[in-house]
Amino acid sequence: MAEKTIVVCNGVAPSNVMPALIFASSGIALDYEVHMFFCPAGAQALVKGELEKLGTPNPVDLFNTILDQKGKVVFCELAIVNKGIDPKNLRDSRIVVEKVPPFLMAAEGAKMTFVF
């Protein structure tokens, strides 16, 4: 079974989002089971058009690689009310909207955790 890796994004600045995407996509490249969690502070990055505002390497390509290779991307349900983000505006239908407890249960046994 592949090693499980957790990547948490807790901000929308490029210094939060880009390392989160790079670490997650790198884990995918190493055949790790990658679970990403976007806290309310980082949730805006998952809205359509937001990744395009960041720099290089191409954040859209990194994000698509994560989802295309079966990485799990979670949008914190609290951001719906907290940040006023409508899930219909998320950039991809494969993004999972859930609360923290289910994510933590899925994260159990992870060998590596990264928070940006």
Image (cartoon, rainbow, N blue to C red):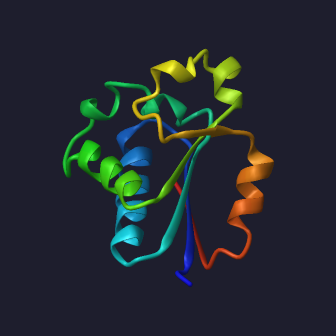
* Left or right: residue 81 compared with residue 39: right
Q: Image quadrant of residue 48? A: top left
For the point 35% across and 48% down, the residue is 63
For the point 26% across and 30% down, the residue is 53
- Of 93 and 26, which appears nearest the observer? 93
Q: Image quadrant of residue 31? A: bottom left
Q: Position of residue 103 (x, y in %)?
A: 71, 53
For the point 51% across and 40% down, the residue is 95
Q: Quadrant of the N terminus?
A: bottom right
- Of 74 and 112, which appears nearest the observer? 74
* Left or right: residue 7 compared with residue 24: right
Q: Position of residue 97 (x, y in %)?
A: 63, 36
Picture layout, residue 17 above or below residue 23? above
Picture layout, residue 82 above or below residue 101? above
* Left or right: residue 110 compared with residue 92: right
- Of 115 and 43, which appears nearest the observer? 43
Number of numbered discs overlaid on the protein picture: 0
Q: Position of residue 33 (x, y in %)?
A: 52, 70
For the point 27% across and 42% down, the residue is 60
Q: Position of residue 101 (x, y in %)?
A: 80, 49
